[in-house]
Image (cartoon, grey):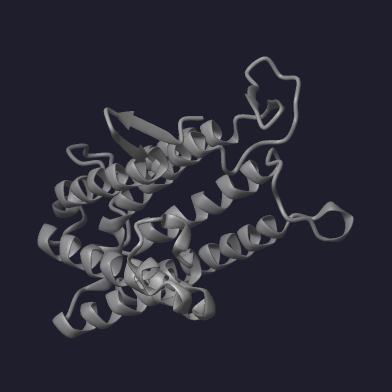
Amino acid sequence: MLPIIQIGPMALQAPGLILLVGLWLGLLLSERLAPRFRTKPNDVNNLVFVGLIAGVLGARVSFVVQNLEVFLLNPLNIFSLNPGLLDPIGGIAIGLIAALVYGNRIGINWKPILDAITPFLSVMVIAFGFSNLASGNAFGAVTNIPWGINLWGGMRHPTQVYQILAGWVILGIIWPRTGSSTTVQRIPGATIIGFFALCACAWLFLEAFRGDSNLLMNGIRTNQIFAWLLLAVSMWGYGYLHQQESFENPG
């Protein structure tokens, strides 16, 4: 773990810094690859930027509303840079709504631009793995495997490293390939659906080795239920896209 990076008198929170670097690299990659998804780099940049800004602000507002009494005692904490004072669910919801409103206002063609955002999302999967490794979050179950890491008083599965590797595999699969006559052109919208399906599969795999999962009856893991639902919706969406493509382009 490396939660703090000390540079002279300045202490930087490594997990947050890693996520910021991941945001920058992911957005840069999606901009560079946007033409391969038949969309404009500026549209990708603007949509992600609007979603991120609205998401961060929304996450803080949601957290403040849920803990209003605490913030009334010290209102300046509203402007704290501590990422622990954010509500992820509220932030994601508000960020998605803001991006949807912005996209509809400027008349974005949603399928290709969502496909173009998948490299950004894949990089963020990798960045979250490194961030969790720095903080010690999302730790694995106790094990005696040779590649286990010493964390929280025992040798554990390096689930953070598994997540990093899964992110690289996902990025490699969704990477847009050009210049080959044998390359099958992907249906617009199929890449983003494929990304979610791959994430669901990775989620199911990673949860089997986690040591901090919420368990229901008979040892069923809550996150695996959500992963199965995400995989089912992704498979339905992929089938719907193919059906729509066959209807629009018969033969």
Classify 23 as above or below 106.
Answer: above
**Foreground pick, 38 / 228:** 228
User: Percent from the top left, x then y, of residue 9?
Assistant: 28, 32
Q: Residue at x 22, y 64 (%)?
A: 49
Q: Residue furthest front?
A: 73
Q: Is residue 59 left or right of residue 223?
A: left
Whether residue 24 is visible to the viewer of this picture, yes or no, is yes
Q: Residue at x 46, y 63 (%)?
A: 85
Q: Residue furthest top?
A: 146
Whether residue 250 is visible to the viewer of this picture, yes or no, is no
Classify 204 as above or below 196.
Answer: above
Q: Residue furthest right?
A: 218
Q: Residue at x 38, y 76 (%)?
A: 94
Q: Is residue 64 left or right of residue 162?
A: left
How many marks are shown on the rendered structure? 0
User: Percent from the top left, x then y, of residue 6?
Assistant: 34, 30
Q: Is residue 154 left or right of residue 51?
A: right
Where does the C terminus fall, quadrant-wise? bottom left
Q: Is residue 183 left or right of residue 31?
A: right
User: Percent from the top left, x then y, of residue 26?
Assistant: 27, 47
User: Percent from the top left, x then y, of residue 161?
Assistant: 52, 31
Q: Residue at x 40, y 76 (%)?
A: 61
Which image quarter: residue 10? top left
